[in-house]
Image: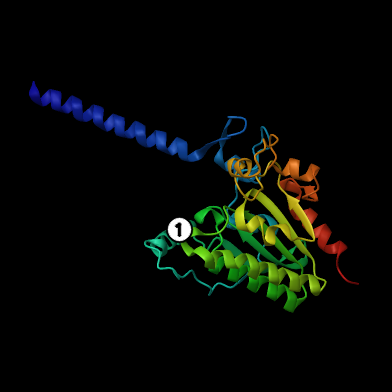
């Protein structure tokens, strides 16, 4: 009798574990859209450029997927791979966290830069990744972006930057904030050379990145419904003592008020960038 009861318990436990495993597999294959609440098969979402087929919500993209969508196949050559993150303030656990993220994301830092072709047009492409410390800008990120701009100047190429960031990286303190001036200075030299800089703002672009190179493009594009701003709404309201309009940090609001030049859907982004490059080629 006791043995039979034990067998029944073990059988139930085995069944429960199998069901949990099956459930986990299903969760891993499906994604819920925050906008329309529809459940989407992940493979179909990837085929649709990570855009919800029901409501058009643009999901956040990894640097790897973004580069695959924008750069012509086999043309992307990385710039600044040797630039690595250091811990100038000896912030406890910082480098361990960075190393863990490298292992998880398979990228070196929150930005990946390189020379590539976009519909046959050569350009320097920089892509930030929110999966790596929310795309925050530390000294390595600032150096990679600056080196990419300098490469664009040297090679006489346009510079294309996909921005996504939570702002300056707190683990590097003032050194992180210095990257704002560093990247902005490099952009100024790019302008002096008469070279094209296209900045593309994606969800979210905030903090010190918005306050520096993200806002300095000759042409500023944005993806639909992207969150774009410097500080959070509550901080701004407390500072200016005024109630802010609904959706004032959306790309649609910023387009209406002249902060950006055009909102471009992901399916049209590559062709739009290529067209702009062709228009600005010096004959």
Which residue, as the protein is rendered here, is positioned at the far bottom? Answer: 154
Looking at the rendering, in which quadrant would you find the C terminus? bottom right
* Colour pattern: rainbow
**Quarter assignment of residue 181:** bottom right
Residue ID at (41%, 62%): 94
In this view of the protein, can residue 76 be seen by the observer? no
In screen coordinates, is 246 left or right of 279? left
13 relative to 126, above or below: above
Which element is circle 1 on? helix
Return the x and y of residue 282 as percentages of the image width and height: 88, 71
Q: Residue at x 46, y 36 (%)?
A: 27
Q: Residue at x 71, y 47 (%)?
A: 223
Residue 135 lies, in percent from the top left, at 56, 56
In the image, taking residue 32 as reference, residue 225 lies left or right, namely right
* Residue 243, horizontal then vertical, whole percent: 67, 35
| Residue at the (26%, 32%) spot, across then down | 14
Write down the quadrant of residue 185 in the picture: bottom right
From the viewer's perspective, is residue 143 above or below residue 167? below
Tell me the residue that label 1 is attached to.
101
């Amino acid at each position: 009798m006791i043995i039979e009861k034990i067998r029944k318990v073990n059988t139930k436990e085995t069944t429960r574990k199998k069901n949990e495993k099956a459930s986990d597999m299903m969760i891993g294959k499906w994604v819920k859209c925050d906008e329309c609440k529809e459940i989407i098969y992940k493979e179909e979402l990837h085929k649709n450029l990570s855009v919800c087929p029901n409501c058009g919500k643009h999901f956040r993209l990894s640097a790897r997927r973004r580069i695959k969508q924008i750069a012509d196949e086999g043309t992307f050559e990385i710039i600044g791979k040797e630039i690595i993150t250091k811990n100038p303030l000896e912030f406890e656990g910082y480098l361990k966290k960075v190393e863990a993220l490298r292992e998880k994301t398979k990228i070196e830092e929150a930005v990946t830069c390189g020379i590539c072709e976009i519909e046959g047009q050569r350009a320097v492409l920089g892509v930030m990744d929110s999966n790596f410390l929310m795309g925050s800008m530390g000294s390595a990120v600032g150096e990679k972006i600056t080196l990419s701009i300098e490469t664009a100047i040297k090679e006489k190429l346009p510079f294309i930057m996909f921005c996504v960031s939570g702002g300056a990286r707190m683990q590097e303190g003032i050194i992180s904030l210095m990257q704002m001036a560093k990247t902005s200075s490099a952009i100024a030299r790019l302008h002096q050379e008469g070279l094209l800089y296209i900045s593309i703002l994606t969800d979210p672009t905030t903090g010190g990145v918005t306050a520096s190179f993200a806002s300095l493009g000759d042409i500023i594009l944005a993806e639909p419904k992207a969150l774009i701003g410097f500080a959070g709404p509550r901080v701004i309201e407390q500072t200016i003592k005024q109630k802010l309009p609904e959706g004032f940090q959306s790309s649609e609001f910023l387009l209406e008020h002249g902060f950006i030049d055009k909102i471009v859907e992901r399916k049209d982004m590559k062709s739009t960038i290529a067209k702009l490059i062709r228009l600005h080629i010096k004959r």
